[in-house]
Amino acid sequence: AFELRRRLGDRTGEALSASTLGHALHLRGRYDEAADLFDRALSLRESGEDSGLQAQTLLNRGHLHRDLGEVGRARERFSAALELYRQVKDRNGEAIALNALGILALDVGRPGEALEPLQAALALREPGSREQAVTLTTLGVTFRQLRRTADARRAYTAALPIFRALGDFREEALDRK
C-alpha cells in the first residue's frame, strides 16, 4: 500500500502508510526503521494538508523518543502534537497528548509536573470510558508519588467502577493494588 500510494502521488495516503508502518516497527523494537518512517511521514505532512494526521505522527514519534530515553525530544513532539490537536479541535487527541506529557513527567520522577496535564486530560475524557478510568488511575499514581494519599484513593475509587462496568478485569485488578 505504501509504494502504491507513492506511485499514485497520494501524499496523504503515503504519509499515513509510513506512520502506520512506523508504529508497527516501533512496537517490534525496530526503532531506527520506525524513526525513518515517522520522519518520512512528517516530511510528507508538513504541507499542512491534514494536521490531525501530522499530530498523530508527532505523537508516535514522541513515544519512540520516550522509549529511547530521549525525554526532551519526546516532550517536544508531544507538545507539538498537542498544539495541532488543539488547532483541529480534536479533544480526544488533545487528551492523549496531555496524558503522554503527564506520563513522561512521571517517567523522570517529576510527579508535580505530571499533575496539570493529567488533570487537563481527565477533563477531556468521555465519562465512563476506559480512557477516563486509565487517566484516573494515572492520576492516582501521581497523587501517591506526591504523598497525597486521600487524593490517590479518590482517583482509584473513581476508576474502579468504570473498569468493572466495562468488564476490564485486568485493569480492575491493577487498580486495586
Image (tube, rainbow, N blue to C red):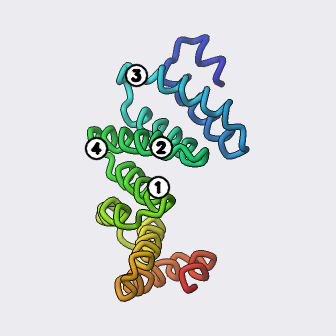
Give the mark, 1 or 4, whose residue is nearer the N terminus.
Answer: 4
Residue 46, numbered circle: 3
Circle 1 residues within 10 Å: few <14, some 14–19, many ≥20:
many
Q: Which residue lies at the image location 35% right of the left edge and 70% below the top edge?
A: 127
How far apart are the two marked residues, 3 and 1, measured between alpha carbons?
A: 25 Å
Give the mark, 2 or 3, whose residue is nearer the N terminus.
Answer: 3
Q: Which residue appears farthest toward the front when viewing the image? A: 109
Residue 26 lies left or right of residue 48; in this view the side is: right
Under mark 3, the amino acid is: Glu
Under mark 2, the amino acid is: Ala
Under mark 1, the amino acid is: Leu
**Circles 1 and 2: CB distance less than 8 Å?**
yes
In the rendered image, residue 89, in percent from the top left (x then y), is placed at 27, 44
The residue that disc 2 covers is 74
In the rendered image, residue 176, in percent from the top left (x then y), is placed at 55, 86
Residue 86, numbered circle: 4
Give the mark, 4 or 3, whose residue is nearer the N terminus.
Answer: 3
In the rendered image, residue 7, in percent from the top left (x then y), is placed at 61, 11
Q: Which residue lies at the image location 61% right of the left edge and 79% below the top edge?
A: 169
The quadrant of the image that shows the N terminus is top right
Under mark 4, the amino acid is: Arg
Q: Is residue 20 visible?
A: yes
Asked where in the image residue 128 lies, by quadrant, the reply is bottom left
Q: Mark 1 or 4, which is nearer the eye?
A: 1
How far apart are the two marked residues, 1 and 4, measured between alpha carbons?
A: 20 Å
The quadrant of the image that shows the C terminus is bottom right
The residue that disc 1 covers is 104
Q: Is residue 158 above or below residue 110?
A: below
Q: Which residue lies at the image location 47% right of the left edge and 39% below the top edge?
A: 73
